[in-house]
Amino acid sequence: MKRVALLLSIMITAMTAFAQQSGPEAKTEADPFGWKVNWVPFYLWMSGIDGNIGVGGKTAPVGAGFSDSFANLNIGYTTMLDVRYDRVGLLTDLAYIDLGSDNTLSPGLLYTQAHSDAKLFFIDPELYARLLGSDRGSVDALAGFRYWHLTARLRLDPGILPAFSGDETHNFVDPVLGARFRVNLKRGFFATLKGDAGGFGAGSQLSWQIYTGLGKEFKKRYLLFLGYRRLDVDYRSGGVIFDTKMNGALLGFGLRLK
């Protein structure tokens, strides 16, 4: 909760500073009123993972850094659609990621090795209001929900205790609040930052994410994006625990449809 409070505090401070410098909103070529549709057909998320996965009352640590992403196929597919009319829009983020990890347990007495795998799908529709928009950039306030579909598998190699293998699938929904910022730079370059927090015991105990990066627009219709994303979630229900931190590089391609 302290990290979430700090994240929200930073966003509020940034929003206030941006508002003081931007002045009143006006119709501009960079941020016109009317319909606006942006679609990112795909961006790759090369994610590491750290935390704990539990199935059937058994829990084991997981850990695979960024350098292990390719070896463990921890590469997620994500797509995003942003539809806005004047100051009100709908941002929809959809992601699928397959996370795997093999860990030697310490001291390795009860079990010697843990093999874990989590297949994670979520869709995150959020309504937003454009608070500020100009040639210099924009500020949006967002509210929505994140629907999760989680399949967790855990296999423990025998030590003192016999081998264990189990898997479970759970679905849950987190309410989400957040904010998004964009700063337009020169020659079609831009910087963006989005953060949100959710769960609050309704689905997960807590989930929050932040992603940021730099992009380049071409011919006012195409864009390339390179950035970083971190997503933390603490979900506990029955014998399932999914308490993880996922983070890594983003690489994406986008289209402006309208």
Image: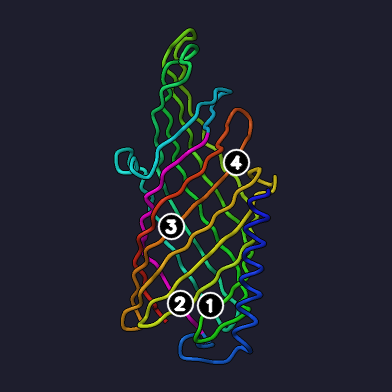
Q: Are marks 1 and 2 in contact (CB under 8 Å)?
A: yes
Give whichever of discs 1 and 3 has the lower sequence position: 1
Mark 2 is surrounded, within 10 Å at the Cα level, by few (under 14), some (14 to 19) or many (20 or more) other residues, namely some
Disc number for residue 234: 4
Counting residues from the start of the chain, the first of labels 4 and 3 encountered is 3
Q: Residues within 10 Å of mark 3 (few under 14, many from 20)?
A: some
Which residue lies under the disc numbered 1? 84
Q: Amino acid at mark 2?
A: Val
Task: Check disc 2 and report the residue beneath it.
Answer: 37
Q: Which mark is residue 228?
A: 3
Residue sitting nearer the eye, 1 or 238:
1
C-alpha span from label 4 to label 3: 21 Å
Dot 3 lies on which element? strand
Q: Percent from the top left, x then y, of residue 188?
A: 37, 81
Q: Quadrant of residue 7?
A: bottom right
The structure residue drawn at horizontal position 64% and vertical position 53%, both measured from the top left corner, is 4
Give amino acid for label 1: Arg
- Does label 4 or label 2 sit earlier along the sequence? 2
Q: Callout 4: few (<14), some (14-19), or many (20+) C-alpha neighbours within 10 Å? A: some
N-terminal label among 3 and 2: 2
Label 1 – label 3 distance at C-alpha: 25 Å
Q: Is residue 100 above or below residue 89?
A: above
Q: Check residue 33 for magenta coloring.
A: no
Between label 4 and label 3, give the one nearer the viewer. 3
Percent of width and height locating residue 17: 63, 76
User: What residue span does the magenta drawing correspond to?
Assistant: 35-51
Q: Amino acid at mark 3?
A: Tyr
Please give the name of the residue rendered at 40% of the width and 37% of the height, measured from the top-left corner: 64
Does the residue at mark 1 contact the one at mark 3 (Cβ under 8 Å)?
no
Vertical side of 243 occupied by 138: above or below: below
In-front residue for pair 149/256:
256
Mark 1 or mark 3, whichever is nearer to me: 3
